[in-house]
Amino acid sequence: MKKILVTGGAGFIGSCLVKSLVGSSGEVVVFDNLERGSIDRLNSIKDQIEIINGDIRDTKEVEKAVKGSDVIYHLAAVNGTENFYKHPKKVLEVGLKGILNIMDASLKHNIENIVVASSAEVYQTPLKIPTPEEEMLKIPNPLEERYSYGASKIASELVAFNWAREGNCVQVFRPHNIYGPNMGWKHVIPSLINKIIQIKKDGKTDLNILGNGLQTRAFCYVDDLINGLHIMQSKGARNELFHIGTQEEISIKKLVEVISELMEIKVKIITSKAPKGETEKRCPDISKIRKLGYSPKFSIKDGLKMTIKWYLDNPFYLNKNKLL
């Protein structure tokens, strides 16, 4: 029986991946310090998996977890725009020590199949939209806190591919604006849902957003990402990288309008100055993974319906969720 290790497996994407792996003729092991992830996300399958409460920055803990693995999915990270600005040192520390520990332990124990999560943040402001995998990676200003996450992911890619030259096989995926139920509150879509819920409670209409609302993103429902990961892992070349996402680009202003329409609550959008380092447009070219058979199934409206329903059905999270 295969041993499949998922670091960050109690996080939003990690927990969805873990659920999809259960029953795949392998032992699934979650490695997470549960500081940002939540064990609640795994309640429905916790008797079918092993959960290791460990810190990805701890070399000995990582080495112990890696030993005997056949496949490793390395997703552990501190993400979320608010964290990039408020906790840049931690973002970098988790990113850099995490990838070094995983790759060093993998070399030591001859792990031949490693999947590493990168990010669309490696491009910052891309020159080409839709953006191909060959786009230049860049850090415009090392003094800007926001770039802590992008820098950690660029370093992760470099470490993964160069350590692989000594015996590992790796695949790197760059997810683009993934969303869905139970992803916490500090990402744009759940944050907007929460604001609209509060507007209804207060009997108001004003909804404040960062920037002018013309920024665009191509949001990808989490089930599409998980499907793309399985396709990449089974059919994609080793020591390669792939975008996973959609090319359904939407402005933040239009996103607010769609969410408020689905929630049947009227809002008045109030714009503001964009935060430093904000990217105006982000949309991946996904032709590379399409050639492997990947095709997104969920439109933005379909994905939002399921996401909104989850948040409305889980009022506990509205006031007490501590996920960053």
Image: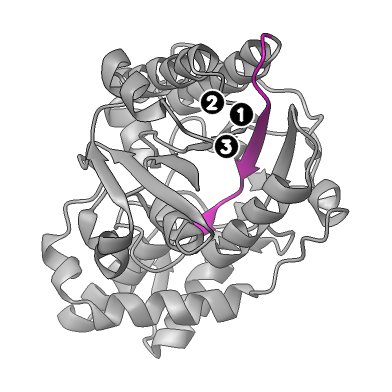
| Residue 233 % position (x, y) | 68, 46
Tell me: 55 left or right of 259. Answer: left
The residue type indicated by label 3 comes to Ser
Q: Name the one closer to the observer, 123 or 205.
A: 123
Please say if the residues under marks 2 and 1 sit with CB atoms less than 8 Å apart.
yes
Q: Name the one closer to the observer, 291 or 246.
A: 291
Describe the element under mark 3 as helix, strand or loop.
loop
Q: Earlier in the sequence, mark 2 or mark 1?
A: 1
| Residue 13 % position (x, y) | 45, 53
The image's mark for residue 122 is 1
Seen at 79% across and 45% down, the residue is 129
- Residue underneath mark 3: 119
Q: Which residues are the magenta region?
A: 166-178
Please say if the residues under marks 2 and 3 sit with CB atoms less than 8 Å apart.
yes
The image's mark for residue 272 is none
Describe the element under mark 1 as helix, strand or loop.
helix
**Mark 2 vs mark 3, CA separation in Å:** 6 Å
Query: Vertical placement of 178 versus 193: above or below?
Result: above
Query: Vertical placement of 206 versus 97: above or below?
Result: below
| Residue 261 % position (x, y) | 47, 86
The residue type indicated by label 2 comes to Lys
Instruction: Quadrant for residue 188, please give it.
Output: bottom left
Please say if the residues under marks 1 and 3 sit with CB atoms less than 8 Å apart.
yes
- Residue underneath mark 2: 153
Q: Label 3: how many residues lie within 10 Å, few (<14), some (14-19) or many (20+)?
A: many
Instruction: Quadrant for residue 77, please give it.
Output: top left
The residue type indicated by label 1 comes to Val
**Mark 1 vs mark 3, CA separation in Å:** 6 Å
